[in-house]
Image (spheres, rainbow, N blue to C red):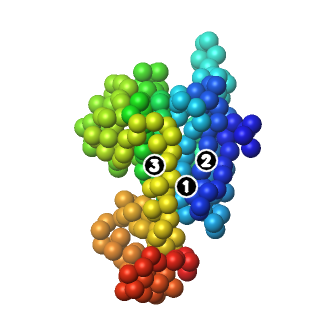
Amino acid sequence: SMDKKIFSEIKDNIGIVWLNRPEKKNALNDELWFGLPKLVKELDENEEVVVIILAAKGDTFSAGIDINLLVEAFDLNEDLRTNAEERIEIMEITKKFQDAFTTVAKTKKPTIAAIQGFSIGGATNLVASCDIRLSTKDAKFSIGETKLGLVADVGALQRMPKIISKGLLRELAYTGKTFGAEYAKEIGFVNHIYETHEELINGAMDLAKDIASNSPLVIKGVKMMLDKGEELTADQSLDLVRMWSTSFLTSEDLKEGIFAMMEKRDPKFKGK
C-alpha cells in the first residue's frame, strides 16, 4: 500500500486515510481528490471501524488542489470564452469535486483531521468537512481561492460558518490570507496543537481511542444528532433524539454502561 498516493489502514478500531504524495506536498491531484471519498466510505461502512482519521505523510498536510488538475479539469485555455454547453460541463465537474468532500462530511462515524505544515485552499475546505481538527504548531491554513481569482466552491464557505464566528470567517474569506495554528486554535477551527508531526499523530490516535472507548452505537447517534440538529429547529431535533432513544436506548451497551459504573470498572461495549 505504501507506494499508493493515498491509502488506508485500520489500527485498534481506528481507520486512518493517509495522503501519501509528500514529494508534491500532498497536492490534491485526481488520485487523491477522488480516491479520498472512496476510502472514507469504505471505512465508514466497515463494522470494525469506530473513528476515522485523515492524515498525511511528509512535512505538509496538503498544498491544496494540484494546479495541473485545475487547468485540465476546467480546460483553462487562453481565450477562456465559453458557450452554454461548456458552462453546464463546468457546473457538473465542480459538483463532482464538491461531492468528494461531502462524502467526508456525511460519514456516520466521527472524523478527525491531523494537520501538519500547510493546509491551503482546497485542503482547508477538506478539513472543514471533518468533525475535529488537530494540528502541529507550524500548520498554516487559508481560504486562498480568493487570491487565485476563484470563489472557494468545495465546502469552506458552507461548513466554516458552523465552526468559527461569522465576522472572522468573512475576514479570512474576503482576504484569502494565510493563518497559523495559534490563530486557528484561538478562533476554534483547531481543537489542539502539537509540537511535532509524531506527537500530532499520537494525539489524534489517543483522541480517537478515547472516542472509541464509548459505545459505537451511541457515538453514531451523537454524531447524527449534532449533524441533523444543524438543519432542524430545537423542537424537531428533540423529537429526533426522542425517536432515537425509543429505538436504541435499551441496548446491551446501556446495560453494560450502567453495570460498569456501579461496579467501578471500564465498560466493554459491543455496539448493540
Categorize mark 2 by other alpha carbons within 10 Å: few (<14), some (14-19), many (20+).
Answer: many
Q: Position of residue 143 (x, y in %)?
A: 41, 31
Task: List the residue tagged with mark 3.
Answer: 203
Amino acid under label 3? Gly
Q: CA distance from mark 2 to mark 1?
A: 8 Å
Question: From this viewpoint, which residue is outermost toward the left?
Answer: 167
Cα distance, mark 1 to mark 3?
14 Å
Q: Is residue 269 above or below residue 63?
A: below
In the displayed structure, 36 sits above or below 88; it is below
Quarter of the picture containing the C terminus is bottom right
Residue where numbered disc 1 is placed? 52
Secondary element type, mark 2:
strand
Name the amino acid type tagged 2. Answer: Val
Residue at horizontal 64 percent and vertical 25 percent from the top: 23
Q: Residue at x 69, y 36 (%)?
A: 5
Q: Position of residue 52 (x, y in %)?
A: 55, 55
Q: Residue 200 shows which numbered tag?
A: none
Do residues under tags 2 and 1 come within 8 Å of each other at their CB atoms? yes
C-beta proximity under 8 Å, tags 1 and 3: no
Select label 3 or label 2 by which is in front.
3
Q: Amino acid at mark 1?
A: Ile
- Would you place residue 239 above or below residue 126 in this image? below
Q: Earlier in the sequence, mark 3 or mark 2?
A: 2
- Location of the N terminus by quadrant is top right
Q: Residues within 10 Å of mark 1 (few under 14, many from 20)?
A: many
Label 1, secondary structure: give it. Answer: strand
The residue under label 2 is 17
Q: Residue furthest top?
A: 78
